[in-house]
Amino acid sequence: MTISRRDLVKMGIAAGTVISIPTVLRAQTTPPEARTVRMVLGDLSTFDPIVSTAYTSGNHGLAIYDTLFALDSKLRPQPQMVGKWGVSDDKKKYTFELREGLGWHDGTPVTAADCVASIRRWGQVPSGGSLIVERATDISAQDDKTFIISLKEPLGLLIDTLASTTTPVLFIMREKDADRPATEQVTANVGSGPFKFNEALAKPGASFTYDRNEKYIPRQEPSDGFAGGKVANVDRVIWENISDPQTAFAALQSGEVDFLQDPSPDLYPVIKSDPNLELQVLNKAGDVYFMRMNCLQKPFDNVKARQAMLHLIDQEAVMRTAIAQEYISPVTSFFGNGTPYTNDENTGWYKKGGNPEKAKQLLNEAGYAGEKVVILQHTSWAPGKAMAQFLAATLRKVGMTVDLVPADSATRGELLKNGSWSIMMTNESDYERSTPASNPTLYANGEEGWYGWPKSDEYEALRAKWAGVGTLEERQALAREMQRIQWDIVGTVLLGSAVAPIARSKTLTGVIEMPALTAMWNMQKVPA
């Protein structure tokens, strides 16, 4: 049984004795409200950020783990756990030395062996890690603080890849946790980051608690994006799981929570008019919403049926079901709206309002004969829930048989894996559309790939060149060719782009503005 400081006080222990109790006991003291932040960040169902690509798992990882490198506010990689690093003249051998003061939450020091095990496990899943591991001749610890990555050939994007925030992110875990298959979940939740996961206060389905890691030593540089000093300005962060949007907003409005990740768009005017609340865009580049079709089953095993969906979608109408007009825009480039690789190659299919007649023609050419289309409706994600309903109605209008299957985060994951679906919807940051070497949603490697399993050997041959080319111009030329192929094979259908604000109390300041993930450090509460 855990004995808290309050219990000891109740037992009549003298004040001097209470002050001298071990830190492990004093840590159980409930911090004052001014030092506690309550956040609604979605349904956290998988803790291991390598097993899951969900942003919720990534946010959990960002709190308790640390990274070798991190992106600053201009999306440039900066050293984080690494103190010094260098590369050989032939660009094939990288040497990394860890900075001083890195320690696990269990009190043991972080070692180079931990980093090696984490990189190797990360390399087992579709990510930048797999690219690095495939090209490596050696990834090994040289001593307690130094490790190397030796390559068969130069990999100009290596440091950028180590710093990438495309999930799964390279979070460094203890060797004994990372030394297992990537399909086997890590359950310990012991990291070296600025916050510690409080197992004693975990309430699955209700809330999870993170306490400030008093022994964490931040970098000396100022906080800049996810880089620089990770300073925890609050003692505790409570991740509240409130799935109902109205209930979550009511909690924010009443002051029971301080931060709401995905406020319902119809509440934006109410939030704007509330003197105690504020809308804030953290991901300035926005998110790209898209759907994936199951290319292994009818009707979408036929490329013409997939092309029909490309013509059918009215992006503006889809996005308006969940997001206010002022925050949405169409997106026609496979590489997003605001990346260095955005282009207009093979985008003649786009038509404002969609083209239902062309979609019907392509469905006829595909020989569509009324096969059931199973659309997964993500009930734990409000925009996805609304978009799924709209999409089902859109498909029925062109004569398709549709079955809408509601699923929460946990059951949805199982359905996705077993392939008993036709269409799923998700989103990712615009930034992630710029990383085809590491982002599995941009692969076309068939059954070895990400959900939907589109396959194009021609596309994959081009993608394989991405990390090896030396200039931005060369990658931009590759992007045009890759996009041409993608809009022919249609492994993905874009639904639109949106900048989605979070809602927060005005007493909560310092929230970091970066794509995709949400950091718990740097923020603080000020008196109302």
Image (cartoon, rainbow, N blue to C red):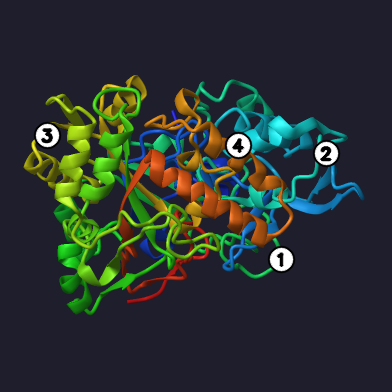
Screen quadrant of the N terminus: top left
Tell which of 382 and 298 is nearer to you.
298
Callout in the foreground (3, 1): 3
Q: Secondary structure at mark 3?
A: loop
Mark 1 surroundings within 10 Å by alpha-carbon count, few (fewer than 14), some (14 through 19), many (20 or more): few
Amino acid at dot 1:
Gln
Screen quadrant of the C terminus: bottom left
Amino acid at dot 2:
Ile
Tell which of 373 and 51 is nearer to you.
373
What separation in Å lies between label 3 and label 1 (alpha carbons)? 59 Å
Callout in the foreground (2, 3): 3
Q: Secondary structure at mark 2?
A: strand
Please tell me which of labels 4 and 3 falls first in the chain. 3
Q: Residue at x 56, y 41 (%)?
A: 24
Q: Which residue is mark 4?
A: 461
What separation in Å lies between label 1 and label 4 (alpha carbons)? 43 Å
Tell which of 229 and 90 is nearer to you.
90
Q: Which residue is mark 1?
A: 220
Residues at marks 1 and 2 touching, judged by CB atoms closer than 8 Å: no
Callout in the foreground (4, 2): 4
What separation in Å lies between label 2 and label 3 (alpha carbons)? 55 Å
Q: Which residue is mark 3?
A: 400
Please tell me which of labels 2 and 3 falls first in the chain. 2
Measured as percent of width and height from the top left, residue 257 is found at 28, 59
Please tell me which of labels 1 and 2 falls first in the chain. 2
Q: Which residue is mark 2?
A: 148
Please identify the quarter of the rendering in which residue 303 is found: top left
